């Protein structure tokens, strides 16, 4: 397992770099808010508890329920603060390129922000589309982020990852510095811990 990780993590780092290069192609269209307060919320969930269920609209017109994945897939919720911002515009394309990592662990990403669906739709199309659902927690504003304790005082979500096993149990919560992407080796380790 350790030998496999030594191979996979550098490969994923390469893909992550490719995603960064892809997103810089439209850098002049991205709003840079400058440095933000690192963390501005209090978690309301923790490892070992059942993940709060939710239903949110996706940019493809479907309504996605977390409970739809119970018994079928491991889930990584990826909360990002805002569409059309530099770090967010690098983060999700990296997950798109690393799809094999998620497939290997029978996991799906659910991308969530408090942006409205039309804004998310245009942003995702600009990034070149993504293989995973992008969900809008716009109305009631930030209700899901708040349920998880990830809604910031400015109305954006934290940059956070919530790992959920096939039973619907939270296995790990990571609230990242909002100004940087979560490390890919952390994601690989948490997916490996979920198993298949």
Image: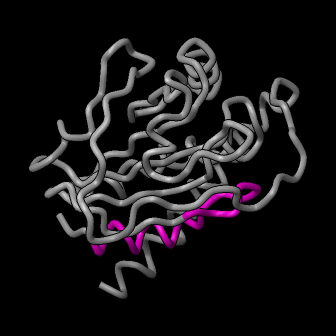
Foreground residue among 140 and 113: 140
**Quadrant of the image occupied by residue 38:** bottom right
In which quadrant is the N terminus drawn? Answer: bottom left
Q: Is 44 positioned to the left or the right of 28 in the image?
A: left
* Residue 33 in picture, x, y percent from top left: 87, 40
Foreground residue among 105 and 160: 160
Q: Which residues are magenta?
A: 175-193
* Residue 57 in picture, x, y percent from top left: 39, 20
- In percent of the image, x 39 and y 35: which residue is there? 132
Foreground residue among 142 and 5: 142
* Residue 150 in picture, x, y percent from top left: 55, 51
* Residue 7 in picture, x, y percent from top left: 44, 76
- In percent of the image, x 61 and y 25: which residue is there? 115
Image position of 89 with respect to 117: above or below: below
**Quadrant of the image occupied by residue 84:** top right
Instruction: Look at the image and say whether residue 48 sits in the magenta stretch.
Output: no
Foreground residue among 105 and 164: 164
In which quadrant is the C terminus drawn? Answer: bottom left
């Amino acid at each position: 397992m350790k030998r496999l990780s030594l191979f996979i993590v550098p490969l994923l780092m390469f893909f992550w770099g490719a995603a960064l290069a892809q997103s810089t192609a439209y850098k002049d269209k991205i709003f840079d808010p400058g440095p933000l307060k690192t963390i501005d919320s209090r978690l309301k969930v923790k490892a070992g508890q059942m993940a709060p269920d939710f239903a949110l609209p996706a940019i493809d017109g479907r309504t996605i329920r977390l409970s739809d994945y119970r018994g079928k897939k491991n889930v990584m919720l990826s909360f990002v603060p805002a569409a059309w911002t530099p770090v967010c515009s690098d983060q999700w394309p990296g997950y798109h390129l690393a799809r094999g990592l998620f497939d290997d662990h029978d996991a799906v990403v659910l991308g969530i922000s408090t942006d409205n669906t039309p804004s998310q739709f245009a942003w995702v199309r600009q990034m070149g589309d993504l293989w995973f659902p992008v969900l809008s927690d716009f109305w009631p504003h930030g209700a899901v982020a708040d349920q998880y304790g990830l809604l910031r005082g400015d109305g954006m979500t934290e940059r956070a990852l919530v790992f959920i096993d096939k039973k619907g149990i939270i296995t790990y919560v990571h609230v990242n510095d909002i100004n940087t992407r979560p490390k890919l080796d952390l994601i690989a380790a948490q997916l490996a811990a979920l198993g298949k």
